[in-house]
Image (cartoon, rainbow, N blue to C red):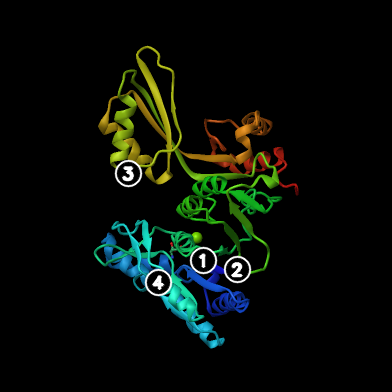
Amino acid sequence: MLVVKKFGGTSVANKERIYNVAERCIEEYKKGNDVVVVLSAMGKYTDELIAMAKDINENPPKREMDMLFTIGEQMSVALMAMAMNKLGVPAVSLNAFQVAMHTTSTYSNARLKRIDSDRIRSELEQRKIVIVTGFQGINKFDDYTTLGRGGSDTTAVALAAALHADKCEIYTDVDGVYTADPRKVKNARKLDVVTYDEMLEFATLGAGVLHNRSVELAKKYGVQLVVRSSLNTNEGTIVKEDAKMEKMIVSGVAADTDAARVAVIGLKDEPGVAFKLFNALAQKNINIDMILQSVGRAGTKDITFTCSDEDADEAAKIISEAMKFEDINVNKEVSKVSIVGAGMQSNAGVAAKMFEALYDENINIRMISTSEIRVTVLIDEKNTERAMNAIHDKFNLGEER
Ligand code: ASP
Ligand code: MG
């Protein structure tokens, strides 16, 4: 059996943690399995590199940032190989060049295109544990690239797909995927299984356990994932296509406080207005999430949308320069609360139940958006935790099934 194991920054933050990971990998190796390990940079090292760069040049070239970033992952793989060798097991570390992990050319946000598996295979044939740098790649100019923050998860899934691995385990500092953030909801429960689509919603909603591109990739290539803790031996959460076994309509509640609402009032009610507005924002790379347009009256209409807190003021400025309207207002004190569940596609009344939970708490809903497996409401930020708990209770998510 071939197993890919990925460990995040906290799992390799110091000497003791490095040895802990080394031992876990050796245990797998001693069962006779082939083991490929993907590592992130130690602890908050990537953040430290960014701070160092900004101290030299507040606007560093992206190519040089990637050159700098790659040392973080390179450091952890080399130290890990040393630890395994010290424990008497042959191990070899490889960076993106040595493996040959080909990506698109975009520095700091590259996408993996192709991974050569020859070098890894030949090292495995010599019964070595192979330790690969996460997050990094090389482009057609023979430069280093990186996959975007948190990109090591994507490296691991891509490697599992390229090597046709039997198992891909993502080790982190939490026990798995929860029905809600356990720091905010007391009776939050770890889920045994979630579907790719549910996980994708959770990842996109900022649950923080997995890089969303890694989930997309896992779904595309049918790589079954296990998310589990490197600090204990608890089972973790399985991410796979069909998770009907749990028979859950709603799997969890997620919240994102990094949301702002921009309301543009008194736009002309004529064709092309929405295009003009959102095109102006797209040109400046501003990501929009929920969108609401009012019914036209007296030749005018209103458009309201949400974006990140950071982008809100700039969005308002861009719109003011691009078009005519009566008034615009920005509210950053709002948050998005969502329920996610593959079972809601075939169940009526799920949204109503969520709204009832909010009504019971006298929490006003400012916007609503839905997908096949998600309902999201925009509410005042100060009500976020109360809303999460009320919804979590309403759907009995804390109860063992
Ligand atoms: N070290 C990189 C980061 O901090 C990649 C990763 O951890 O996945 O974003
Ligand atoms: Mg991560």
The disc at residue 285 is: 3
Query: Does 82 sit above or below residue 41?
Result: below
Amino acid type at image mark 3: Asn
For numbered disc 4, what is the local secondary structure? helix
Q: Nearer the viewer, residue 36 or 83?
A: 36
Residue pointed to by mark 1: 8
Q: CA distance from mark 3 to mark 2?
A: 37 Å
Q: Earlier in the sequence, mark 4 or mark 3?
A: 4
Q: Are marks 2 and 1 in contact (CB under 8 Å)?
A: yes
Q: Quadrant of the N terminus?
A: bottom right
**Is label 1's Cβ within 8 Å of ligand 2?**
yes
- Residue 176 position within the rendered picture, expressed as x and y whole percent measured from the top left: 62, 58
Q: Earlier in the sequence, mark 2 or mark 1?
A: 1
Q: Residues within 10 Å of mark 2 (few under 14, many from 20)?
A: many
At numbered mark 2, what does the secondary structure look like: helix, strand or loop? loop
**Which of disc 3 and disc 1 is earlier in sequence?**
1
Front one among 99 and 61: 99
Q: CA distance from mark 1 to mark 3?
A: 29 Å
Pick the front one: 357 or 139: 139
Does residue 254 appear to the left or right of 390 in the view shown? left
Marks 4 and 3, how far apart at CA: 39 Å
Determine the image quadrant of residue 363: top right
User: What x and y, as percent, mark residue 245?
Assistant: 69, 47
- Callout 1 environment at 10 Å: few (<14), some (14 to 19), or many (20+)? many
- Crowding at dot 4, Cα within 10 Å, few <14 / some 14-19 / many 20+, comes out as few
Q: Residue at x 70, y 37 (%)?
A: 394
**Quadrant of the rendered image containing residue 50:** bottom left
The x, y position of residue 149, in whole percent, is 42, 59
